Amino acid sequence: MVCLNKLGVSGGLPRGRLKEVLEAFREATGAGIDVQLKILQTLPSLIHNYPDDIKGDLLAAALNICTTLQNSKNPSVNNIAAATLQPLVVGLF
């Protein structure tokens, strides 16, 4: 997760692998709090660094990951997911 985060933040992920990365994030939403927080830290960078690639189904997947984590029972994850989701939605418009 740490490597994916660094690659996403730096824009170093291959564009053809974004779907796989988002799928891995989706599958990891049930993992520990540290993993969930890393996902939430990485999503805005992915959307910012790959705006021409993350649209349609990929954008829906990213937003779905945020909403899934917003339903977390952990208040920290819940609040950070809500704070992450808001700028992502605003950025769409």
Image (spheres, grey):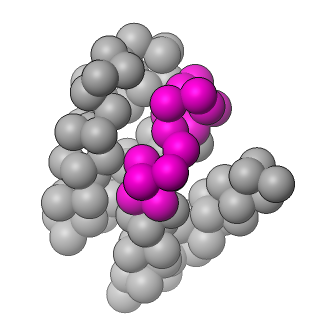
Q: Is residue 45 above or below residue 57?
A: above
Residue 85 locus on image (x, y percent): 62, 63
Q: Seen in the image, is 44 located left or right of residue 25?
A: right
Magenta run includes residue 56: yes
Q: Seen in the image, is 93 located left or right of residue 7?
A: right
Q: Which residue is at 39% across, 12% downward?
A: 12
Q: Which residues are magenta?
A: 46-61
Q: Quadrant of the N terminus?
A: top left
Residue 42 locus on image (x, y percent): 45, 40
Residue 15 locus on image (x, y percent): 37, 20
- Residue 74: quarter of image: bottom left
Magenta run includes residue 47: yes
Residue 30 seen in the figure: yes
Q: Which residue is at 61% across, 71% downward?
A: 82
- Residue 88: quarter of image: bottom right
Q: Seen in the image, is 89 located left or right of residue 36?
A: right
Residue 7 locus on image (x, y percent): 37, 19
Q: Is residue 43 above or below residue 5?
A: below
